[in-house]
């Protein structure tokens, strides 16, 4: 039975290597610059798999008849060598395949950037429709490549950064469409130009960040400065303090004091914030003072224990460690309560979106004075939400959630001024259907981010309460071109990549056609004209059919192009 089991394992390894190598050879045929290296690695892997199968073949083993113990391997050295060769060659294939995937993403990004430059320079709506259709196809490709890459990333921090960048590109794709249309319809409007430029700039930054993550590099060789949070600082500080139980000499008292100073400096983000309640502020200040006192007591006992390890001193040291850690836990609990209660209050207060509704109404009325009044209120709301994100980052609990908080902060910082410029454009051109649609898109992005903040707040609370488990789902092999042979059952999907791409493209093209109709009918001054009314009605009906038809396919198509960014 043992021999047969070993033989089955050897054959299974050989078959698995064969399938793996088939994919590698397909990659080699599609990428001539790596063909030679990839082919050699595939040959080595295939040879190693075949060797393992031969060495574990029952028919080739010696079976001594006089001995009840059967010799399983006559050539153990050969098996070891084959196994090492297999690991080495498979690693080479994976590394080379990874280079191919990175190259595909960079090439796709370059195509998108080149088309974006063309979109910025167009002067006619007809030319814009043609170029934007090409842009949509390129974004489909980029979305799928980066979605696969995001699934493959094992670093949770990089995974979160990739998700944030792709979320920006998803939302900005629709913004770019409406902002560009508005600029073409009102070429002399400064606020429309500012609005469009902001979208292009944000998309370029997101594209650049994707490449930084994929290539694991930063421009000009800069090192990434990791955001420091109170949660992380307290965790590291406690680890050092508790380490004194095992070793009294592994760090200096100056190091421990410096770590506490850094933590307390970050608590000033809470105590200096205008949005922190008086009660929370007082508690944080009290706990900060207590933490300093507890550390002084700990250092005093620690220094004595270094000179003389008596039983009483070691017991005093244990008490000092426990009291210091308890104080830090209370501080962590207090800042968490301050941040999450503020977030809950703000999100509840802003759920009615009254300011956004008022901007839409006053914009359509052409009331510049009222628009200016509500843009000031939106700016105040933006500052509140940005401060909320900064405080939540300190208590987020994990690096991915920290990155999500930073992304949310950036989104509010950028989207606020974009809503203002869109509202100003509508107020200047109150009868413009395109300007109205543009403002709607930016308001939807703001509302969507507020909704995301509610989910983020729940996740942060789950982490704090210890209710959140690790979720790791990775794809094991790179997927060049169309070679997906052994990946069909990894994750059930309603539509495959090609079908999603076709639907996204058709939806985008149909939306562009209806936009063309809207642009033309808007030029007609006589809105009572029967032909114009019929044209506008057909355009609206077509828009509804696009959304209704696509939803029947089970595809999230909120902004016509959202499907591009769904992970495979």
Image: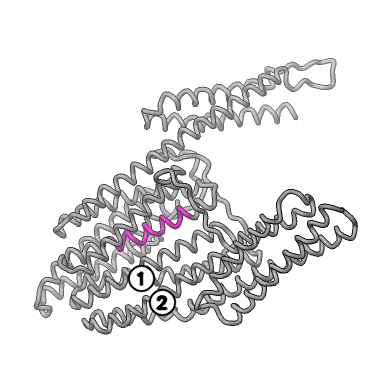
**Position in image of residue 282 (x %, y %):** 62, 79
Query: Circle 2 sits on which residue?
Result: 381
The secondary structure that most of the magenta stretch takes on is: helix
Query: Circle 1 sits on which residue?
Result: 416
Query: Would residue 173 be counted in the magenta stretch?
Result: yes
Q: Which residues are magenta?
A: 161-178
Q: Quadrant of the N terminus?
A: top right
| Residue 382 appears left or right of 198 | right
Question: Could you tell me if residue 54 is visible in this image?
Answer: yes
Residue farthest to the right, as pictured: 311
| Residue 453 appears left or right of 115 | right
Q: CA distance from mark 1 to mark 2?
A: 9 Å
| Residue in the image at 68% along x and 57% along y | 256
| Residue 183 appears left or right of 345 | left
Q: Residues within 10 Å of mark 2 (few under 14, many from 20)?
A: some
Looking at the image, residue 441 lies above or below residue 488: below
Q: Quadrant of residue 409?
A: bottom left
Given contact means CB atoms under 8 Å apart, are the residues at marks 1 and 2 in contact?
A: yes
**Position in image of residue 199 (x %, y %):** 30, 61
| Residue in the image at 23% along x and 83% along y | 367
Labels 1 and 2: the sequence-earlier one:
2
| Residue 233 appears left or right of 120 | right
Q: Residues within 10 Å of mark 1 (few under 14, many from 20)?
A: many
Q: How is the image coloured?
A: one colour
**Position in image of residue 132 (x %, y %):** 24, 55
Please state which of residues 372 and 254 is positioned toward the viewer in this rendering.
Answer: 254
Question: Could you tell me if residue 178 is visible in this image?
Answer: no
Please state which of residues 459 and 232 is positioned toward the viewer in this rendering.
Answer: 232
Query: Would residue 357 be counted in the magenta stretch?
Result: no
| Residue in the image at 61% along x and 59% along y | 232
Total marks placed: 2
């Amino acid at each position: 039975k043992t021999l047969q089991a070993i033989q089955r394992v050897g054959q299974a390894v050989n078959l698995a290597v064969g399938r793996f190598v088939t994919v590698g050879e397909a990659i080699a045929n599609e990428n001539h610059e790596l063909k030679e290296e990839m082919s050699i690695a595939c040959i080595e892997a295939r040879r190693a798999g075949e060797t393992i199968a031969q060495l574990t073949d029952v028919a080739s083993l010696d079976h001594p008849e006089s001995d009840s113990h059967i010799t399983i391997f006559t050539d153990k050295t050969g098996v070891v060598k084959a196994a090492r060769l297999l690991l080495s060659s498979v690693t080479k294939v994976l590394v080379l395949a990874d280079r191919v995937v990175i190259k595909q993403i960079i090439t796709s990004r370059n195509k998108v950037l080149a088309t974006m430059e063309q979109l910025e320079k167009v002067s006619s709506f007809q030319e814009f429709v043609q170029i934007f259709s090409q842009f949509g196809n390129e974004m489909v490709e980029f979305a799928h490549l980066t979605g696969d890459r995001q699934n493959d990333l094992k670093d949770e921090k990089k995974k979160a950064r990739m998700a944030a960048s792709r979320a920006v590109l998803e939302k900005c794709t629709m913004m770019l469409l409406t902002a560009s249309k508005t600029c073409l319809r009102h070429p002399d409007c400064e606020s429309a130009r500012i609005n469009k430029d902001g979208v292009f700039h944000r998309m370029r930054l997101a594209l650049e960040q994707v490449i930084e993550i994929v290539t694991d590099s930063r421009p000009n060789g800069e090192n990434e400065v990791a955001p420091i949070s109170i949660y992380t600082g307290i965790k590291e500080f406690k680890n050092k303090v508790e380490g004194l139980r095992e070793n009294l000499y592994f760090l200096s008292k100056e190091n421990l004091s410096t770590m506490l100073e850094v933590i307390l400096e970050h608590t000033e983000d809470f105590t200096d914030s205008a949005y922190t309640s008086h009660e929370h502020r007082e508690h944080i200040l009290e706990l900060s003072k207590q933490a300093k006192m507890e550390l002084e007591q700990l250092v005093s006992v620690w220094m004595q224990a270094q000179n003389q390890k008596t039983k009483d001193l070691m017991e005093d040291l244990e008490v000092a460690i426990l009291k210091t850690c308890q104080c830090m836990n209370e501080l962590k609990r207090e800042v968490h309560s301050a941040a999450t209660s503020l977030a809950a209050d703000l999100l509840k207060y802003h759920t009615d979106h009254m300011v956004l509704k008022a901007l839409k109404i006053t914009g359509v009325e052409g009331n510049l004075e009222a628009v200016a009044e509500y843009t000031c209120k939106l700016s105040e709301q933006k500052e509140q939400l940005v401060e909320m994100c900064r405080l939540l980052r300190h208590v987020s609990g994990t690096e991915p959630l920290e990155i999500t908080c930073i992304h949310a902060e950036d989104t509010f910082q950028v989207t606020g001024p974009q809503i203002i410029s869109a509202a100003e454009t509508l107020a200047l051109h109150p009868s413009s259907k395109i300007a109205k649609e543009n403002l709607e898109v930016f308001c939807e992005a703001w509302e969507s981010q507020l909704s995301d903040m509610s989910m983020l707040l729940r996740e942060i609370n789950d982490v704090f309460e210890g209710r959140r488990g690790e979720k790791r789902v990775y794809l094991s092999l790179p997927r060049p071109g169309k070679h997906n042979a052994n990946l069909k059952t990894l994750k059930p999907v309603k539509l495959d990549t090609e079908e999603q791409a076709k639907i996204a493209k058709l939806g985008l093209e149909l939306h562009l056609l209806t936009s063309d109709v809207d642009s033309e009918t808007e030029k007609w001054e006589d809105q009572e004209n029967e032909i114009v009314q019929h044209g506008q009605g057909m355009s609206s009906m077509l828009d509804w059919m696009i959304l209704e038809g696509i939803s029947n396919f089970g595809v999230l198509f909120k902004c016509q192009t959202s499907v591009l960014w769904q992970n495979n």
